[in-house]
Each structure stands twice: as C-alpha cells, then as structure tokens.
Amino acid sequence: MPRRILIRPQSGPDDGIGHLKRDVAVAMALRGLGFEPVFLPASGEAPRRLAEVSGFEALLFEPSGEEADFKEVLRLAGELAAECVVVDSFRLSEGYYRRMARVTKLVAFDDLARFPQAAHLAIDHNFGAEAVARRGADSAPRPCSATLLCDPALRPCSAKPLRRAKQRARYAGRSREPATQGEEESATQSTSPRTRWLLGPGYFPFRPAVVEAARGREPDHGGSRVLVAMGGSDPKRLVPKVLRALSRIPRKLSIRAVAGPLSSAYGELEEAAAASKHEVAVRRDVDELAPLIEWCDVGVIAGGTTKYEMALCGRPAATLLQAEDQMQVMLQYARTGTVLNLGPGERLGEEEIAAALEGFLADSGRRRLMSEAGRRLVDGLGASRIAEAVAELADRKSGEES
C-alpha cells in the first residue's frame, strides 16, 4: 500500500506559486524516501498543472470558505489514508491549524509568525528565525540540526523590535498575538510543546533542477544578462514596470522577462518588451525557472522564494516587493548581503527603479560579494532535511508525536 502524504499549498492570482514550488521540492524528496505525495492546490488549473508536470497527482480543489476547506482536506486525508497532512498557507486561521493537529499528524510551513503554531512539525526557513529562537526562554521548542550557513556574526535586523519580540514569544511559548475572530482557543496559549521547529535557511527546500543549475554556468559579475521575474501572478504588474525602467539605462542589456502562469499583465509586458531599447525575450508559463537563473548574471525579482534560488546559484538580485507583509522578512533577509532590497514595487516610480538598478548593474565588485554571500547562506539540502523530519513524524505511532 502506498505511503501517502497530502499537501495543501496556497496558490492563486493573489498568492503566486512560491508556496507550491517549495512544496513540490519537499514532495520530490519525500518520493525519494518511498512516500507518494498528493497535492491539493487551492485555486485553479495552473497550480494543478505545475504539480502534475512535476510528476504528482493533483486534485482540483475550490473551497468556499475555511470550514469547507477543513472538511475537504480531512475527508481526502482519510480517503487516501494519508500518514501526514502538510499545510502551506498564510490565509488560514490559528483555529484551522489547531483543529487539524488534533485529528492528524500536521506539518506546517509558517514563515510569517502570525500566531502560535500547533502543528507537530513546523518550518520557518527565514534568515534570523534560528537566532530569534535561541534568544527566547529556556522553554523554546528545539531547532533541528541544520544551522545558518551564513556569517555567524550577522544578527537579525534591528528594525521593528516589537516584531522580533513577538517572534521570540512565539518560539518560547509566551505569545501575545491577539486572537482573530472565531478562533477556538485564546492566543495566550502558546506554541504547542509538541511542535518541532525546523529553523533557518538550511531548511529552504530547493527543487533538484535548481541544485543542478547551481553547479552550472558561473555568473559574469560584470555581465549584462538580466532576469526579471516577479512571481507566478505579478499582482502589482511589476515586470512591465521594471522593463520600462531598464529602458532608461544606457548600458546595453540582454533581458529575459517572465510572465508567471497566473499573471494578468501579459499584454502590458509584451508592449513594454517591444518598446524596450534592449534585447528582451518574454517567457510565458515557465514550469521551471532554474534554466533562466543559470542563464542570467543578475536578477530583478520579487520578495518571495526565488531569492533563495538566486542565492544558491550565486546570482545577486535586486528585489521589489509585491506585498506589504514581505517587508519584515526582506528587512531581515537583506542582512545576508545577497540582495539589494528596493522596497514595495508599487511605491516606486520607474525613474527611481532605473537609478537604483543602473548603479547596481555598474558595481561588479558588490555583485561578486553578493554572489559569494548567497553560496554561504544555503547549501541546497533543505528539502532532504525536511523530508527526513516528515518521515520521522509519519513513522511515529499515534500519540507519540511530541
């Protein structure tokens, strides 16, 4: 009988496909351990196609609300005899995770620190997560063996200390996050003592294609190959905006611009590409970004999971954020020295973006240092580390999850 794991990723026009991509990486590693992951993407045909292209069964899922979502996930987990359920969503409430953890072995990606975590296994691959946990109380959940692979002298960003205090409280079991309406338990109840945390960039899950690209072509730190990719949906229509900004730069560039499978800006992107003074090739419905990362010398990307893929491949990048909730994570991540964070993309004019990128592209010394920092930050083994922890959880008898 196949050993199934049910994976419920967040995906859609407002969410992109970054969650799904990291879940696919973990699923590939789980398949290598003898499991058969099944995907339950929460929106539309494009996410389902991405899972299927990667070789996994994907069931169509259009929940009409959180309660319907919970019941359908639970029904399918029972129908498939799934040994664990993996949930990767920032749109579900604390109550959802607590209820799910009561009835099945639950694994959760949790990198926004919105509330105490009830899952049996939780992953926060953000830079600084491990350091925050270390500075918590003695009761902090134990991090696993993979440590930050960057310069140990780096410390979490000092911006917004209240935010860090909330993170420390979450890991240490003293959360003061306010409860959201309808939750079953008070947010003064802490992270479950049975929660096992996998913390830091050593747990970022890379797909095999990205690991292979990291072994390929070395970047030219004075080169002019630019990748522009703003996630699977590009809700702020930043790719055409960046193309127009790059047209203001006199230096000749070769550009690959990616329209994600959920993007509604394809027409505007084509117009910007046609009007550009540079050589621009548009790529649409890209199933795997790794070959384009290997092709480029530098990237202009959003603040999601692609920044780790660029780092592993030694590609420096400038980031423009699609969402306000990425700001705290990016302020922290920028301390790795692998990216130039320009801030929320919709707040910046094309002239401002052009000025920042012109200086960035001209500074080959800085780009070389960023490339070296990226390769110190991550080693490409995060998916295997997560899969081994999931397998360990699946092998435990019911009631022995702590």
Image (cartoon, helix red, strand yellow):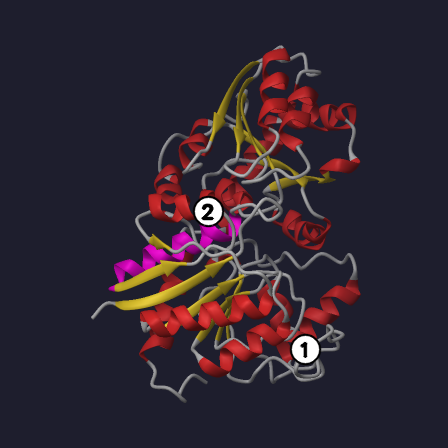
Residue 23 vertical position relative to residue 337 in the rendered view, above or below: below
Chain part drawn in magenta: 18-34
Q: Secondary structure at mark 1?
A: loop
- Please name the residue shown 70% across and 25% down the image: 359
- Find disc 1 in the rendering and name its residue: 183
Q: Is residue 23 magenta?
A: yes
Q: Which SS type dominates the magenta stretch?
A: helix
Outermost residue to the left: 1
Residue 272's quadrant in the figure?
A: top right
Residue 381 visible, this orientation: no
- Kindly indicate whether the residue at mark 1 contacts the one at mark 2 (C-beta within 8 angstroms): no
- Find disc 2 in the rendering and name its residue: 47
- The percent position of residue 104, horizontal first and vertical second, equals 43, 78
Q: Secondary structure at mark 2?
A: helix
Task: Specify the quadrant that holds the N terminus.
Answer: bottom left
Residue 49 shown left or right of residue 360 in the figure: left
- The percent position of residue 387, horizontal first and vertical second, equals 36, 64
Q: CA distance from mark 2 to mark 1?
A: 29 Å
Residue type at the position of mark 1 = Glu
- The percent position of residue 76, horizontal first and vertical second, equals 39, 68
Mark number displayed over residue 283: none
Residue type at the position of mark 2 = Pro
